[in-house]
Amino acid sequence: AKPQLAVVGATGAVGSVLLGILSERADIWGEIRLIASPPSSQLLPQGLDSARTGGTPMRRGDPHPSAGRKLTVRGAEVEVVALSEEAFEGIDVAMFDVPDEVSAQWVPVAVAKGAVVIDNAATFRLDPDVPLVVPEVNAHAARVRPRGIIANPNCTTLSMIVALGALHAEYGLSELIVSSYQAVSGSGKAGVDTLRAQLSAVSGTELGNTPGDVRRAVGDTLGPFPAPIALNVVPWAGSLREDGWSSEELKIRDESRKILGLPELPVTATCVRVPVITTHSLTVHARFENEVTVAGAHEILAAAPGVVLSDDPAQDEYPTPADVVGTDPTWVGRVRRSLDDPRALELFVCGDNLRKGAALNTAQIGELVAAELQG
Ligand code: 2RA
């Protein structure tokens, strides 16, 4: 029999992309049960994880936001059921797209009911007994899951790691320095709504030459961002951690190390939010054990599953979010060997943060588990 799937948190920005992806890909599931995002009393205010909840702040005591709603999966309408222990009855695989604290509470419940859980929250990502899986890079890790949980990486790590995994397999990665250019949908629906509202506030306005004019035009409608995001770049994503690092920067470091199996890899990340709706970009300085060539890197990237090489600057060919959005692969361009280091490459990488960055990778891990369960 085909395995039974549950999707928890199906109505958020990532959840709705996931339902689309499950409808497009090979139909390997028996029932697909949709389980509501948790009741409002269990939600924190909107924040880093609001991509999973749709970003709508909910107050304690609000009625359950999604149970009873009907959503379309595989061309059929499916009613969303409330989150409860019973909702996991008969479920073989459960995909979770909920805030971290909800995942902490409900993932163990689903596991106790017998489901293998694929979790898109940060909660279990660094647990040594939970594999952190990117099928193109470390599919083998998905089979060893002592807690019955497989974690899905953060969208920023996922937007670059498939390309880096391919280069690492050939050249041996020894250091990574990256800067991100992150889309507002990483901050959920609230992020997208804020950018749209600010763009209309600034369009047609005589802004003059000073940055303060953007701030005046948008007023205090900053949404989930610490500064105006229209006509601006904001060197911040996530929450403040020790010594000035952001949680997002530490995630890139910790998660890249774990996925690549390089626990000591030096990784430096600077995360920046840009006025793009969907698709994260990164500039990457990757240093390797061995000397590299652009031709060699091109060959590796062109052959790597899940990677598209788009690198011909003479023809204005390189990836941009406008061209990458809505696609599945990791796109790589601007491949150069560092002028002062024959072991290092400079790259520009783009990935759709809602697809490969979240929903697609979850669906791909689900396919690995389903194949395994069916023996
Ligand atoms: C962001 N990576 O882009 C986050 C979402 N989890 O804000």
Image (cartoon, rainbow, N blue to C red):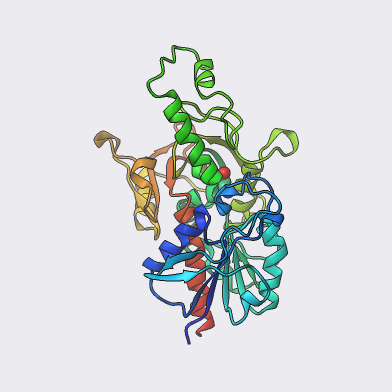
Which residue is rendered at x = 63% and y = 45% of the image? 46
List x then y, in percent, for residue 52. Answer: 57, 54
Q: Please identify the residue farthest to the bottom as the structure is shown.
A: 1
List x then y, in percent, for residue 135. Answer: 49, 64
Q: Please identify the residue farthest to the right as the structure is shown.
A: 242
**Placement of 374 over or under 199, stated as above or below:** below
Which residue is rendered at x = 36% and y = 47% of the image? 324
Which residue is rendered at x = 24% and y = 36% of the image? 315
Circle count = 0
Q: Viewer-proximal residue, 113 or 12?
A: 12
List x then y, in percent, for residue 331. Answer: 39, 48
User: Where on the picture, by quarter, is residue 108?
Assistant: bottom right
List x then y, in percent, for residue 231. Answer: 45, 26
Residue 124 visible in the snapshot: no
**Placement of 48 over or under 28, stated as above or below:** above
Residue 197 visible in the snapshot: yes
User: Where on the picture, by quarter, is residue 215?
Assistant: top right
Q: Viewer-proximal residue, 333 or 288?
A: 333
The answer to whether 263 appears left or right of 349 in the picture is right
The answer to whether 342 appears left or right of 296 in the picture is right
The answer to whether 66 appears left or right of 354 in the picture is right
Q: Viewer-proximal residue, 54 or 329?
A: 54
The answer to whether 20 appears left or right of 361 in the picture is left
